[in-house]
Amino acid sequence: MAGIGEASAIIGITHVGFSLAKALNTYLSDLADASDDISSLVSDIEATLGQLRDLGKLIEKNESTKAWTDDGLRNAKKCVTDCDRIITKLRKLLKKSTASATSDEVNRDEIDVTKLERALWPFIKPRLEVYRRELQSIKQDIMIAYSSYMTKFGSDAERRKYTDDMPGLQRTRALARRQLREAKEHRRRKGSDWRRKADAEGSAQIPTPNIRPGTVRPDDDGDGDEPLVYENLDELEREFETWKLEENERQAQEEAEKRAVQEDAVRSWKLQQSQEIESSRQKIEDARSSLRAELTTRHIAPQQIEEIVDHVHPRIDFRSELHVLSRASASDKAVSVVPGSDSGEATPARWWSIWSRK
């Protein structure tokens, strides 16, 4: 009963992951520079694990339905192990050196909040960003695995829906993987820059961490537990400001890329809706013409014919639907007030993936 084993593993992974997200949430109000990034990480953890929980139900069902091929089932199971791997890495990265990472629940006291504060955050951020991008990539893999099952074993309507969604999911996965590669490259460059400065100027002149034996380096995938010790915090502050500018530019570029993908999906949907509207209108006109021709052969008065045609096949005013589609283009760029904003100022409306399944 392999499906039962996978289901048990998923219960354990989601329990640890959701408790990690909950523990991080308790620190959001205490953080300054890392608050938005940690909030995004928490959202990605919860969204990915929610998808994983849904996938687990299909893995159990597949024991009897056999909807997946052998490769499809392997891909679904790989999503489980990938989630376990990333949640484990996140937990080890964020825990205190004295905390254990073996319990089945993460509590608030396990988190080393100093790693999320201004002095250490530039060194932790690149690594955490890689893990966040990995979660996003895994989420897309899960959604594709879920959709591939439903295209074979869903209802007729579900099969059509998930078949239509698949191209968009594939494009979003390609984007997620590219962003993961870029995050890894960014992390590698930052690590190289820190080492190069250390070699050129000496550790006393730059914000390079003084690493004690067994300590995790900012660009290392190891799991050492010793804390990092830093010298020359004034220079570190300047380094942080430079890093923050680079991050803002990179995030703006990513947002533009996401928007391009989503706008392409919206355009495709609008085109499909317009074609369906035109097809419906044409069918009604054909039916009216056919009925009118039949009634004419029966020598019915023209005015009476039109009354009968209007009664049997009334014209539908599709202009309102087309107007809604045209207005949607304008509303895409509308501004809205961010809920909970103290200033109440208008800000660009946030974009959400039309393929997200919360």
Image (spheres, rainbow, N blue to C red):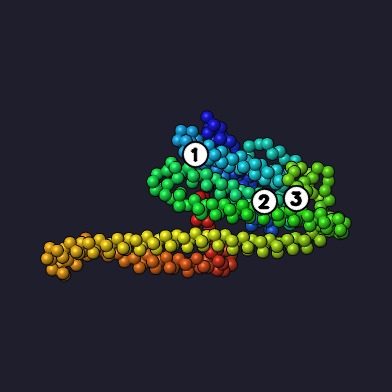
Where is residue 236 drawn, in percent x and y?
79, 59
Q: Mark 2 or mark 1, which is nearer the start of the sequence?
A: 1
Q: Residue under label 3, please give it.
A: 219
Query: Which residue type carries mark 1?
Result: Trp
Q: How many marks?
A: 3
Above or below, 144 against 299 in this view is above
Where residue 79 sits, quadrant-wise, is top right
Q: Are marks 1 and 3 in contact (CB under 8 Å)?
A: no
Q: Residue under label 1, please give it.
A: 68
**SS at mark 3 in the image:** loop
Where is residue 101 drawn, in percent x and y?
69, 39
Q: Is residue 86 left or right of residue 322?
A: right
Where residue 320 sits, quadrant-wise, is bottom left
Q: Mark 2 or mark 3, which is nearer the start of the sequence?
A: 2
Question: Between 302 and 64, which is closer to the camera in this rendering?
Answer: 302
Q: Is residue 208 left or right of residue 167?
A: right
Q: Residue under label 2, please give it.
A: 130
Above or below, 117 against 104 in this view is below
The residue that appears at 16% across and 63% down in the rendered structure is 295
The residue that appears at 31% across and 66% down in the rendered structure is 317
Q: Residues within 10 Å of mark 1 (few under 14, many from 20)?
A: many
Q: Mark 3 or mark 1, which is nearer the start of the sequence?
A: 1
Query: Which residue type carries mark 2?
Result: Val
Where is residue 85 drawn, in percent x and y?
65, 41
Query: Which residue type carries mark 3?
Result: Asp
Of the two numbered discs 1 and 3 in the rendering, the one whose residue sits closer to the viewer: 1
- The residues tagged by marks 3 and 2 sit, at their Cα atoms, a distance apart of 11 Å
Q: Which residue of the protein is positioned furthest toward the left in this rendering?
A: 299
* Residue 334 in sight: yes
